[in-house]
Amino acid sequence: MPSEAASRTARTHRKMNKSINSPGRNHFMTENVRHILVLAPNWLGDAAMCTPALRALHDRFPESAITVAGRAAVCQLLEGLPSVAKVIPIPAKSGPRELARIGRTLAPHARDLCIVFPHSFRAALLARFTGSRQRLAYERGNRGILLTDTVAPHRENRRITPIFMAREYLELLAPLNCYNDFKGLELHAPPEDLAAVRAQLTPGRPTVGFAPGAAFGPSKRWPAERFAAVANELAQRTRAQFLLLTGPGEEDTRNAFLKALTVPVIEPQASRPTVARLKAAIACVDLLIGNDSGPRHIAIAFKKPVICIMGPTSPSYTENPQERGEVLRIDVDCGPCQKSHCVTGDHRCMMGVPVERAVTAALNCLKLSR
């Protein structure tokens, strides 16, 4: 007779399956699946949110070799996961001829099954070029001809609507009988990078990380000067030490932050601007303060509280029940617009969040007296 815990798990799985939209088409052969290729999401935050699905895929096919292919930064992010046997960086943009060549290179890893997380036609075309006998993706963008199996996207009133991305990735795997273990996002930082970051920190002092960038575009960025103002105020009211987390392409944001800063700051990525070092730095903080971008979800994966300043994007994509901290946002008549550049010109969704609100939220998270 099954245990009560097993019965609860089975009920949870059934409930999850009932919540999944009817698949577009699927007729999977799940026996003798030995080589699985996953085409990873393009953004760091999305890639972090796909980790529960990678774990579920590994749990379903524990004897299979799961290979992840994606942008170089995404591969660095996912490196070290026990559910992934290998990561293969591929170019971010390629023409059809180059895409066909990449597909041939990936073919041995995709022999039995290819999972396509990105929504693009290009990703489905790459899956087709691998020659995988089973190619699964969401039914979007007229790309069904390139796939063997599809799942209908989440809809309300017949319109595609946003849902938490980790749930979206898990629901894509439902036809394979992959289940959510509810352990949340998962990442691993290299020991050598962890040691290098810890060597820069003063033991016994709270560590606050600042991530003022956002690769999506300027519409997601709270002014760097405001992040610096939060650090300046926290320095007056706490014993915290501060980390600045910026990478290649974020030089202007870094410079603006440093120009407005009046207190010392540590830059753990200065000598090694890699995603591996970014993971290690975030794994060492007691609190991360940043925009709705990749570092936010990396922090969640490392079980760190986050103060997130959110503007143009719908919170439905990122509402993680396991996130600790606070999301600071205001409702505006033009949002959420999902655009990389503000179309009104006044950036009201971000500019409306005051420095004082972020300071108060940070103090509450750190549980430090003023």
Image (cartoon, rainbow, N blue to C red):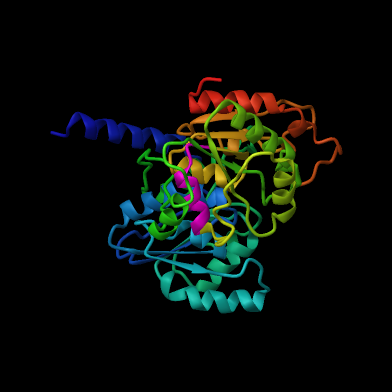
**Towards the viewer: 335 or 229:** 229
Image coordinates of residue 36 in percent, x first then y, are 40, 64
Point 31% across, 51% down: residue: 59
| Quadrant, the N terminus | top left
**Towards the viewer: 69 or 120:** 69
> Can you name the residue that lies furthest to the top here?
369
Query: Looking at the picture, does residue 225 appear above or below residue 27?
Result: above
Point 66% across, 44% down: residue: 212
User: Does residue 342 appear in this view?
Assistant: yes
The boundaries of the magenta stretch are 276-287
User: Does residue 149 appear in this view?
Assistant: no
Predominant secondary structure, magenta span: helix
Query: Looking at the picture, does residue 226 appear above or below residue 332?
Result: below
Task: Verify whether residue 278 appears in magenta.
Answer: yes
| Quadrant, the C terminus | top right
**Towards the viewer: 225 or 323:** 225
> Can you name the residue that lies furthest to the right here?
345
Image coordinates of residue 76 in percent, x first then y, are 50, 61
Image coordinates of residue 18 in percent, x first then y, are 42, 35
Image coordinates of residue 270 in percent, x first then y, are 59, 58
Task: Verify whether residue 45 appears in magenta.
Answer: no
Point 45% across, 45% down: residue: 284
Total numbered labels: 0
